[in-house]
Image (cartoon, rainbow, N blue to C red):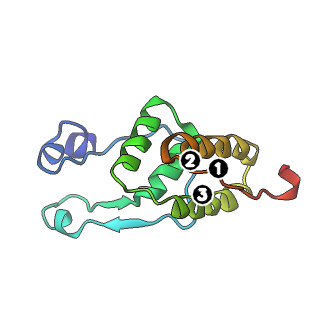
Amino acid sequence: MLELAGKDSKLHERTRLYLDIVVSGLPFLPHPPIFHPQAALNKSLRHFHVAVLDVVDVVVSKLKRFNRDDADDVEAMIKRGLVDHKRLVERFNSAVDKFSMGSRADDIPRYIKTLHRVERDLLRVPESNIELPAWMQ
């Protein structure tokens, strides 16, 4: 797959999109995640079809790890005007609802702190009040 669609592949050169393998783990995604089919691109592909994760869902997913590259990606999406704050909070809450039922629910307060950092430092808006289940507070 990486040879066909990875960084510096012909597909990457042609479309400026590339496949990246992310370390395995349970993704922090809203439920259900929103994927957008890429009809124009898919017409030219033979071996697979592409659907891209919604920009706001990408931001939510990056709040779990949020390393320097993730922060740079989120900042770039915000600077391009692709991240609506209200929608970000709605999609984040959807991910919290889904994730709070799993074995890694104890990590959610850390994701909330990261969301608040994005709100405060990148979106320049007040921090949202994220409701957690009573057992998590």
Q: Please tell me whether residue 31 is drawn above or below residue 75 in the rendered image.
A: below
Residue 36 placement (x, y as % from top left): 35, 67
Residue 90: image x %, image y %?
59, 64
**Between disc 2 and disc 3, whose residue precedes?**
3
> Outermost residue toward the top?
68
Q: Which residue occupies the extreme right position in the image?
A: 135
Q: Amino acid at mark 3?
A: Phe
Residue wearing tag 3? 92
Question: Which residue is identified by label 2?
Answer: 119
Which residue corresponds to mark 1? Answer: 127
Q: Could you tell me which residue is drawn at 66 percent across and 41 percent down?
A: 113
**Mark 2: secondary structure:** helix
Are the two marked residues, 1 and 2, in contact with CB atoms closer than 8 angstroms? yes
Q: Indicate the quadrant where residue 2 lies.
A: top left
Please name the amino acid that badge 1 sits on. Answer: Glu
Taking the image as shown, residue 36 lies to the left or right of residue 45, namely: right
